[in-house]
Image (cartoon, rainbow, N blue to C red):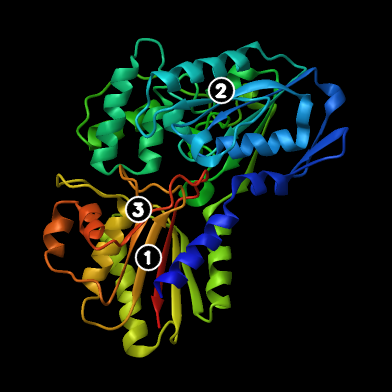
Amino acid sequence: MRKHALQIFRAALDAADPYAAVLRHLKFDGRTLLAGRQRYRMADFDRVQVIGAGKAGAAMARAVEHILGRRIQGGVVNVPDGTPANTGINPRHVDLNTAGHPIPDDRGQQGALRILEIARQAGPRDLLVCLISGGASALLPAPISGHSLAAKQSITQQLLRSGASIHEMNAVRKHLSAIKGGRLASAAFPARVLGLILSDVIGDDLDVIGSGPTVGDPSTVTQAESVLRKYGIRATPMEETPKPGDARLAHVQNLIVGSNRLAMDAAASKAKELGYRTLVLSSSVDGETREIARMHAAIVKEILSAGRPLRRPACLLSGGETTVAVRGKGLGGRNQEFVLAAAMALEGLGPATIFSAGTDGLDGPTDAAGAVADEGTPLLDAREFLDNNDSYHFFEKLHALVKTGPTGTNVMDVRILLVP
């Protein structure tokens, strides 16, 4: 059962491969680049440069190079530490600038300033291909005037520990940034901007993915300030962002090339191939991790006791991204905590395997992507570990952590529950 869960997860990862995702959405005949339904005649441009940031940035840049080759005159993409070494990907025409994630650092700021300068120097005969994937927001720290990187780091850390949603975090980040919330694209005007986006947010909201550097921002300074008040974080001066319909964004095309929904479809296909009756609950699950775990466990209980909504063998799948309000001093992440909470809710009720992992290969501040448990998992002292937010050390002693290493992609999480 654990082997099956891992096979299903691997199918989801394959569908989220950023290199293949870009190749599926871009076509080039030597003269015209087709991106989705929009055409770009290369004769209209004197320069093509690649910019952006994210966990999938290296693979996406390599895919664009595969398509356009020497027509690319350079560029900069910010990626997390270890990306070239872990992925073996090092584009020829685009610089990969490694930086800290999830807490922004000086290297990220230097790369962000280089990217911003490329945008500002672009003219009407320039094409900027902007690559955005999970992690881009933290990897593009360019504080507005009057703010230090240290102050932004402090706010990011406080929001992470508070359990703020990705939407809340990005509303704050955008109004503290010279790049986010459409400001990168507005800086590039009148150049053409093609945004290629690998979605890591629920609903695939363009303005939220990577804090929307190429997308008009519907949130306001007032809303960002209310997020800080909600979590008891001291207010700080902010600047308003370009809104949808802003004339400076008229030359921008944004194209989603990959998402959790596509990963869920692939996982479901693999589960059916393995012989399971399969149900995708949603690719947009959010909320507090323990509550979501209890909800999933309740459905498994119904399968065990009444054979609904699926008869056995059954596979429940869900995607999205939950949040953890950190109250203890332990180590863990939302996926590990989900598995522990669900296993506790199902204790003694019958056979079931619970698997949850992040598609980026990282779960919270740990080296694990997630964890796996089943009816044989000993739950002695589990409540103590859960209350201390210490799911990592609980599963570590059982050799039940899922470790993939950085995958080079990120389309949120995949949760798999199997009933034999």
**Residue 223 appears at what percent x and percent y?**
36, 33
Along the horizontal axis of the image, is 169 left or right of 331?
Answer: right
Q: Quadrant of residue 157?
A: top left
What quarter of the picture does the C terminus occupy?
bottom left
Q: Of the residues tagged 1 and 3, which is closer to the observer?
A: 1
Residue drawn 56% across the image and 35% down it: 57
- Does the rendering let one see residue 39? yes
- Crowding at dot 3, Cα within 10 Å, few <14 / some 14-19 / many 20+, comes out as many
Q: In the image shown, does 128 or 221 lie closer to the viewer?
A: 128
Badge 1 or badge 3: first in the primary sequence: 3
User: Which circle marks residue 355 in the picture?
Assistant: 1
The amino acid type, in three-letter code, at marker 1 is Phe
The amino acid type, in three-letter code, at marker 3 is Thr
- Crowding at dot 2, Cα within 10 Å, few <14 / some 14-19 / many 20+, comes out as many
**Looking at the image, is 413 positioned above or below residue 37?**
below
In the rendered image, which residue does mark 3 sit on? 322
In contact (CB < 8 Å): disc 1 and disc 3: no
**Residue 219 appears at what percent x and percent y?**
44, 33
Element marked by disc 3: loop
What quarter of the picture does the N terminus occupy?
bottom left
**Looking at the image, is 72 positioned above or below residue 3?**
above
In contact (CB < 8 Å): disc 1 and disc 2: no
In the rendered image, which residue does mark 2 sit on? 184
